[in-house]
């Protein structure tokens, strides 16, 4: 029986079809999928904080409305993703516990501070740009609910990236001080954006199996290279310099060469020692605790509704 189920699973992957919640999947596949989807969901939820920091201080009503919409979209992405994880048998309350206890990771990028309004633009340009680069191939991921969720998420991320780039274009047409703000923010976010793609392939324990299961369609280094190649002309059009003296076109490879990434910094962030790790988790925990009465009220309402239906039957 198990052999037959395994054969069907392998066959679905080989034929490039989607696995659905009703389908049998090996335990390793289920665990990997829950890990990736929940870490992704946590990233969207924690990812609301760096930009949320600027909502009350946006320089105009227009910028405030755009930023509010973007941050709200991120909450929505988190919710689609938690729902996708639930279809694999994960419990949302447990996932939240794992996030606020530090047992589960979220993206390294959200542990850096947002110190000027130019950070809002650079996050849209580089962080959403990197997210799109990583996530467009996930629209073809082998798990149906994740792949379908990713289609909508990528459409929204694309709007996010454009709003960031448009904000930076506006600032670059402004004063010298505004141009300096954009350059300074680019200097701070460039290297952390490259780290978003994960460790180098040689040090990535999950890539090989995830590629075999068609969860991931490209390796971390392939996507990182794609992002660098995409970003260089965008930086030129914007008029900013990317902070890497080794960045140069390699005609033989048909790609840009770039300098060494500081993987020690990445490891420190993953251990919880980044500039904002503690603050991000503390804020999320406080928001969760503050929301306890809402969850209790919703549960009480649902119980009352069930009682009413039972007595009417
Ligand atoms: N940060 O073997 P690999 C966004 C962990 S959403 C922290 O290569 P894998 C939207 C990894 O989990 C951004 N941890 O792992 C937005 C694993 O740990 P574990 C999030 C990282 O899974 C924009 C270990 O290192 N996007 O930005 C990171 O095959 C703006 C070994 O790594 C997604 O989650 C990292 N950067 O590949 C929101 C996309 N990289 O669990 C607000 C979906 C690796 O074994 C504002 N996820 N790790 O202990 C993926 O594509 C993959 O999970 C990777 C990692 C590529 C992130």
Image (tube, rainbow, N blue to C red):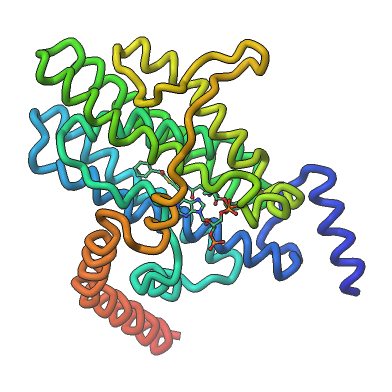
Residue 235, percent from left and from top: 36, 17
The vertical placement of 62 against 67, above or below, is: above
User: In this view of the protein, which residue sits in the foreground, 20 or 56?
Assistant: 56
Position of 127 with respect to 284 (left or right) is right
Residue at horizontal 32%, vertical 55%?
46
Is residue 30 rendered to the left or right of residue 284? Answer: right
Taking the spot 36% from the left edge, 74% from the top edge, the residue there is 101
Task: Say how many tags the image has.
Answer: 0
Q: Residue at x 44, y 18 (%)?
A: 232
As rendered, which of 241 and 173 lies closer to the eye?
241
Residue 248 position within the rendered picture, expressed as x and y whole percent measured from the top left? 50, 16
The residue positioned farthest toward the bottom in the image shown:
311
Q: Quadrant of residue 57?
A: top left
Task: Where is residue 267? Give x, y as percent.
Answer: 44, 56
Q: Is residue 108 visible?
A: yes
The N terminus: image quadrant? bottom right
Residue 223's x, y, as percent? 57, 34
Going 50% across and 26% down the picture, which residue do you hit? 258
Can I make out residue 78 in this image? no
Q: Is 67 located above or below residue 35 in the figure?
A: above
> Is 73 above or below relative to 239?
below
Is 18 rendered above or below residue 30? above
Closest to the observer: 108 or 35?
Answer: 108
The answer to which of 16 and 120 lies nearer the viewer is: 120
């Amino acid at each position: 029986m198990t052999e037959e189920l395994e054969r069907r699973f392998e066959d679905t992957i080989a034929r490039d079809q989607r696995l659905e919640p009703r389908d049998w999947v090996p335990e390793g596949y289920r665990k990997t999928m829950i890990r990736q989807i929940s870490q992704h969901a946590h990233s969207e939820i924690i990812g609301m904080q760096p930009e949320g920091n600027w909502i009350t201080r946006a320089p105009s009503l227009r910028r405030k409305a755009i930023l509010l919409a973007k941050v709200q979209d991120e909450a929505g992405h988190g919710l689609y993703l938690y729902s996708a994880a639930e279809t694999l048998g994960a419990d949302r309350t447990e996932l939240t516990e794992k996030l606020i206890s530090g047992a589960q990771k979220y993206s390294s990028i959200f542990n850096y501070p947002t110190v000027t309004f130019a950070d809002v633009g650079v996050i849209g340009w580089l962080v959403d740009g990197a997210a799109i680069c990583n996530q467009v191939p996930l629209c073809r991921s082998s798990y149906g609910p994740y792949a379908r969720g990713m289609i909508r998420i990528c459409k929204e991320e694309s709007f996010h990236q454009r709003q960031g780039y448009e904000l930076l274009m506006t600032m670059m047409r402004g004063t010298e001080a505004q141009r300096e703000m954009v350059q300074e923010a680019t200097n701070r976010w460039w290297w952390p954006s490259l780290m978003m793609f994960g460790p180098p392939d040689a040090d990535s324990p999950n890539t090989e199996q995830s590629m075999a299961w068609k969860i991931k369609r490209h390796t971390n280094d392939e996507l990182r290279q794609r992002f660098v190649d995409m970003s260089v002309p965008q930086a030129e059009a914007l008029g900013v310099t990317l902070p890497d003296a080794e960045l140069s076109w390699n005609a033989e490879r048909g790609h840009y060469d770039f300098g060494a990434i500081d993987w020690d910094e990445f490891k420190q962030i993953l251990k919880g020692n980044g500039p904002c790790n503690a603050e991000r988790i503390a804020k999320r925990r406080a928001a969760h605790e503050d929301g306890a009465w809402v969850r209790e009220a919703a549960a009480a309402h649902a119980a009352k509704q069930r009682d009413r239906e039972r007595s009417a039957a």
